[in-house]
């Protein structure tokens, strides 16, 4: 349909694009592969250069998307195929099972509270924090719906437990959910898929040592909603560091990493993180290399 648009990616770019398109009268299908919109911005403590709270800016826009009748929000979905031409694209989207009914879930958290304490790293906190098999990505997640990790859940892996199903008052737990293919017909496609961080840094940066963290991991350490409640603590022993070094251009401007170009962002977020570090921990010394 010429009057509808597919937006791939639910970060700040995809969110703002979707809102702008509805202002122009378009129907929008916003597809996000993770369980919540928000993208990388939702993981940041503050934004440069004003140091405003990132979620304070982002959360109202997330809610606006959720409530907009002209935006069909498709979280935990992935685009599998796009074919056609401008004005008439045929798209296949895969809906992944949450094992919790989005229409019934009230977001109360009773399921997670009663879930046995078998925990894994919380991806949202860059694995610095923990989560159970029933979880919500982060407190401000949109939609505010829990999901079940099929690789960790005792009911789905061993056929035992099921305590979440027993305590869920609205009967939202559905262990029979399956993946579902959805076909869309749209007039245009916007790709706003964002970025992923470099996961394989050369050993010369020392990333394999304790207390050497990436910039995004450090954002979660600084965040009041992060694993340490905004305190500047070392992950290894949760003690306050005396000296903190920021190494620039790790993974960029580097022929060894096959990334010869400048990231164009590390100078800005290093300045921001160093300033916030001093605000949170006035006795820590920051050194930028």
Image (cartoon, rainbow, N blue to C red):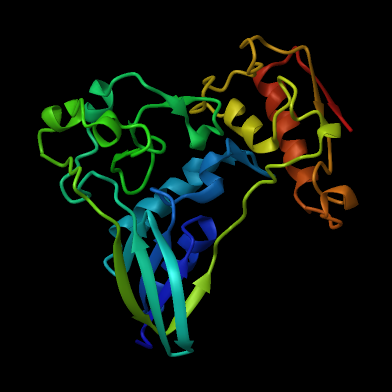
Residue 233's x, y, as percent?
Answer: 64, 16
Rendering quarter of residue 232: top right
Quarter of the image that includes the N terminus: bottom left
- Residue that appears at 69% across and 36% down: 215
Residue at 61% in and 27% down: 222
Q: In the image, 12: left or right of 198?
A: left
Closer-to-camera residue (246/95):
95
Answer left or right for 238 relative to 212: left
Quadrant location of residue 239? top right
Q: Front-most of 211 and 71?
A: 211
Q: Position of residue 279 (x, y in %)?
A: 68, 23
Q: Position of residue 144 (x, y in %)?
A: 30, 43
Q: Residue at x 46, y 57 (%)?
A: 10
The residue lying toward the viewer, choosing from 88 and 53, is 88
Q: Is residue 164 above or below residue 27?
A: above
Residue 261 vertical position relative to residue 241 in the rendered view, above or below? below
* Residue most extreme to the front: 158
- Please identify the quarter of the rendering in which residue 54 is found: top right
Position of 104 relative to 279 (above/below):
below
């Amino acid at each position: 349909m010429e009057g509808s648009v597919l937006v791939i990616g639910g970060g700040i770019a995809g969110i703002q694009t979707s809102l702008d398109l509805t202002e122009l009268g378009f129907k929008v299908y916003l597809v996000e592969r993770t369980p919540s919109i928000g993208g990388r911005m939702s993981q940041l403590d503050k934004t440069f250069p004003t140091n405003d709270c990132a979620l304070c800016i982002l959360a109202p826009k997330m809610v606006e998307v959720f409530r907009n009748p002209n935006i069909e929000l498709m979280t935990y979905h992935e685009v599998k195929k796009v074919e056609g031409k401008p004005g008439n694209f045929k798209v296949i989207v895969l809906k992944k099972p949450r094992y919790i009914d989005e229409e019934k879930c009230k977001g109360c958290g009773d399921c997670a509270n009663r879930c046995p304490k078998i925990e894994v790293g919380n991806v949202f906190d860059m694995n610095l924090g923990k989560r159970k098999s029933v979880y919500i990505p982060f407190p401000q997640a949109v939609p505010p719906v829990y999901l079940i990790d099929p690789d960790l859940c005792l009911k789905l892996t061993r056929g035992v437990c099921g305590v979440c199903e027993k305590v869920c008052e609205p009967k939202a737990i559905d262990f029979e959910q399956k993946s579902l293919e959805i076909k869309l017909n749209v007039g245009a496609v916007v790709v706003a898929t964002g970025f992923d961080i470099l996961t394989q840094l050369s050993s010369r940066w020392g990333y394999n040592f304790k207390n050497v963290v990436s910039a995004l991991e450090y954002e979660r350490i600084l965040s009041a909603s992060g694993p340490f409640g905004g305190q500047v603590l070392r992950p290894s022993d949760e003690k306050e560091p005396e000296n903190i070094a920021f190494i620039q251009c790790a993974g960029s401007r580097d022929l060894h990493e096959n990334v010869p170009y400048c990231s164009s962002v590390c100078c800005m977020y290093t300045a921001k993180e160093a300033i916030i570090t001093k605000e949170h921990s006035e006795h820590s010394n920051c050194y930028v290399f």
